[in-house]
Amino acid sequence: MSESASQFEQERRQKLAKLRDLGIDPFGQRTPGIQPLAEIKSLYKPEMGHDGGPQVIGAGRIMLKRDMGKLSFLTLRDESGDLQLALDKKRLTERDWQVRDLIDLGDLLVVTGKLGQTNKGETTIWADSISMASKALLPPPAKWEGLSDVELRYRQRYVDLWANPDVMKVLKLRMRIVDEIRRFLSAKGFLEVETPMMQPLAGGAAAKPFTTHHKALDIPLYLRIAPELYLKRLLVGGFSKVFEMNRNFRNEGISPRHNPEFTMLELYEAFGSWETMADLIEEMITTIAQNIFGTLQIEHSNGRKINLQRPWRRVRIAELVYERTGWKFDKRPIHEAMPELLKHSELASVRGRLDQISSAEQLFQVYEKLVEHTLIDPCFVTHIPSVIIPLARENKEDPFFADVYELAINGVEISPGYTELNDPDTQARHFAHQVGDKDEQQKVDEDFLNALRYGMPPAGGLGMGIDRLVMMLTGAESIRDVILFPLMKPQEK
């Protein structure tokens, strides 16, 4: 704590003591009848005049205080908005007037009074009584310090939420989006389920897991990187439509689009396919946008515009790469088919290993580095090489490719969708290829393969990153802007 902050706290503690000397609990008590400030504000009608409105009870944090002799004006804020409060010495008891001198910015205050309006036309509560709900011992951050310091905002989200109304707005939009997803899927007959977050094997995606240890069983466990294999077990068990929306954990980097702990939707439908999944996600996202924002034209503050109008484009990955680079993919590696492409500046970060991977993996790398970020309007990228996606069914016409889509919007992948692989022998071969040498064979989920041997119906499945969806719909620039408490490196003392 800085020296100045320590001084401010000492001054506030002195006021805390004075409140107690007045017989006032600085940390309040339950107060029935409190209404949201926005709701109170809406009750006022011009014909009510200066103070002819209803008697109301409100509560909020003090954001502004102006003392004018025997009259003070305060701005209160709660999650619904701001409302002005007037403290007139003639209307208050002597003790309440003494309290006026002991309140600071950031304090939580309860007020009872008549709703009215000032001479300047601002809706105001004319207080009859005030009481403390909580004395703030630390001052709110100065605008140039706390409201704009990004690192401080993320670390002290508990301040950020009330100091920056736009932050509260975006995060409440996230909650509405999640609610809309649940309503949409429930109406489609999907059941929400919960599968293990601690798993004996890390499966369902290629990612580095977080590891832990269960003392009682003396076994290693992994925080899940995906719920996929457990959700498919439910299809084997007889469920026909299931979804889970919860946390996944990947022990990887942090960036504006990656957080090690993130929220993912995964769903599976017996007798579905990648096409039915594409139809479903397209309908879901457009329904959410229309219900919450009232439009399919999403505009970001940076000027970017996203058109969600249906139908969305569906195009093969090889065709997209050809449009962007001129490389007509014929399953030959780049150095044979189009060696000049290797000189592209955007491939610099992967150039050293491009000649060490298969042509299928080269195709996907070129797509990720050169194409994906250009896809602003929704685009289903289809026919991705099957080696990239070991849990998807191979295309019958050309098994080199898988029956999948990757949905890109706003330059990032929002959702993958598959025709799921339900052949246990083929799945076993894919797992073996994925994990590589014999020392890694223990990572194959043999119980999942055993489940497939009992028979899983043909199915479609999809995943969707909730954080990225919220970023796209709200225009947030960083994933940390749409997560209540993003992971931060601890501050050095």
Image: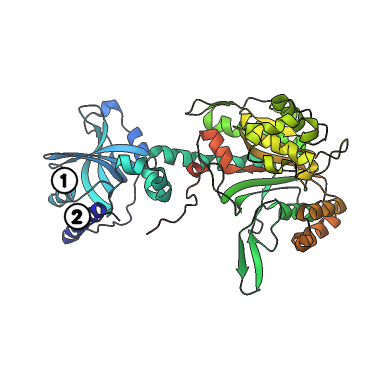
The residue at the point 69 percent across, 40 percent down is 416
Give the colour scheme shown: rainbow
Amino acid beneath label 1: Leu
Label 2 vs label 1, nearer the camera: 2
Which is more N-terminal, label 1 or label 2? Answer: 2
Q: Position of residue 131 (x, y in %)?
A: 24, 51
Q: Which mark is residue 11?
A: 2
What SS does tag 2 mark? helix
| The C terminus - image quarter | bottom left
The residue at the point 56 percent across, 45 percent down is 258
Q: Which mark is residue 92?
A: 1
The residue at the point 68 percent across, 30 percent down is 379
Q: Position of residue 135 (x, y in %)?
A: 27, 54
Q: Tell me: 357 left or right of 129.
A: right
What SS does tag 1 mark? loop
Asked if residue 124 shows in the view, the reply is yes
Asked whether 464 or 129 is in front, the reply is 464
Question: Marks 2 and 1, Cα distance to the nearest angstrom?
Answer: 25 Å
| The N terminus - image quarter | bottom left
Q: Quadrant of the rendered structure where residue 450 is? A: bottom right
Q: Tell me: 458 left or right of 351.
A: right
Q: Position of residue 305 (x, y in %)?
A: 55, 25
Amino acid beneath label 2: Glu
Q: Position of residue 73 (x, y in %)?
A: 21, 38
Q: Which mark is residue 323?
A: none
Asked if residue 283 shows in the view, the reply is no
Q: Quadrant of the rendered structure where residue 369 is? A: top right
- Above or below: residue 25 compared with residue 471: below
Asked whether 57 or 182 is in front, the reply is 182
